Image (spheres, rainbow, N blue to C red):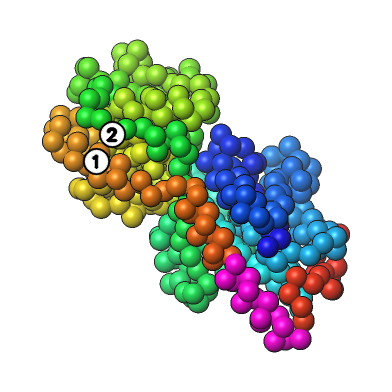
Amino acid sequence: MRILSLSTCPLDPSLGSGKTRLRWSEGLRALGHTVEMIEPKDFETWHGHRRGLRFRQAWGACGLVKTKLKSGKYDLIEFFGGEFGLATWQLSKLPTRPLIVAHTDGLEMLASQRERDYDPPITVKGHLRSTLLGPTHNWLSRAAFDHADAFVSGCELERDFVLRRKLYPSERTAVIEPGLDKEYLSVPLTTSREDRVAFMGSWIARKGIAILIKVMTRVLTADPKLHLDLYGSGASPDVVLSSFPMALQNRITVYPRLTSQPIADGLSKAKVFFFPTQYEGFGMALSEAMACGCAPVTTPTGFGATLRDGEEALICDFTDTDAMERAVLSLLHNDELRERIARNAWERVRGLTWEANISKLEAIYTQWSAEHRVSQAGRGVSAGSNANAQRGCPG
């Protein structure tokens, strides 16, 4: 297959979404397919400006897809992100076109629903922006999925969402979880752990940092031996530490940007992984911590929504800080409970290898592409041909 893959986030292996998109493409190439990867710097108009990002990406992507279709034939175009709604809509109108796949690791329509709960606009300017731009943003997100031929997600929660809205027939949807890097899967399961709780994620509202601060302030106060490790915040250590009471800051470590191995080494020491995230398309941090033997406390989103509460994790409602505090403390102080959940969590992710899941993606893409070629032939056109591709998208 010849695949054109477009991403709304930079293809940076230190970012969760960037890493997974790179891994999918690299894996498909290793299996003999041609994958051309496109990231925002390749199509975003007025790159580097902060205003109107979604609109600039939508417009630029549409023009780039038009150019690409003029210069070559593709069997499949995969779009990672709701910003590609305009390109998907225009591409779907062409009588001769590749298969269109909406491949998501974060479903914007579902994310927007959750965002209204955890980060609602609180200023007049915020309300006005939401009122004026919300409908257009929603159209872009919806169009990216309304006009695609098939859908791939990393979790069942997102697949269920699109099926309930009858956006695809079930046979044109698939859940394929991302894999874990060998540094995490190589960590042996041990019961000997330090009095440490770990968190990994950007220092943003979506990751539940307000709840993290509230709960861990209580937990650190209740347990004077405890240490908190914060990975991947992307923020200044001084900014992060200032969110906590001064008396607790000497028991909190904010780590700089690290590669997989030192993160895996650090997680392998922690008893508990606390992940009060408010929305995840999957949640690589959670699965990586589970592979390192941490007992997780998390919320019912992304990969967390698939875990068995009380067996593979302790699952708490998004805003129930009391339940989260009890869950973290119970795992810290009840070794039998913690070790049982940590073992089940560790075993749950053993099968998350990139090799196995890339093979699943290749199989479903091959099947869908073959079906698309038959459909195109039945309409008297040849699959992959880009005749009339110049129509529909802006130049």
Q: At 85% across and 60% down in the image, what residue appears?
A: 71
Relative to 3, say whether 17 is above or below: above
Looking at the rendered structure, the kind of residue marked 1 is Arg
Residue 388 visible in the displayed image: yes
Tags 2 and 1 touching, CB below 8 Å:
yes
Which of 256 and 258 lies nearest the eye of the viewer? 258
* Quadrant into which the N terminus falls: bottom right
Q: Is 370 covered by the magenta stretch?
A: yes
Relative to 32, say whether 229 is above or below: above
Q: Is 37 covered by the magenta stretch?
A: no
Residue wearing tag 2: 189
Q: At 56% across and 41% down in the image, what residue appears?
A: 19
What span is colored magenta in the figure?
A: 366-380
Q: CA distance from mark 2 to mark 1?
A: 7 Å
Q: Main secondary structure of the magenta part?
A: helix
Which of 61 and 337 lies nearest the eye of the viewer? 337
Secondary structure beneath dot 1 equals: helix
Residue 117 visible in the displayed image: no
Secondary structure beneath dot 2 equals: loop
Looking at the rendered structure, the kind of residue marked 2 is Leu
Residue wearing tag 1: 343
Side of 181 relative to 276 (left or right): right
Q: Which mark is residue 44?
A: none
* Residue 382 image offset from top left, x and y in percent: 76, 78
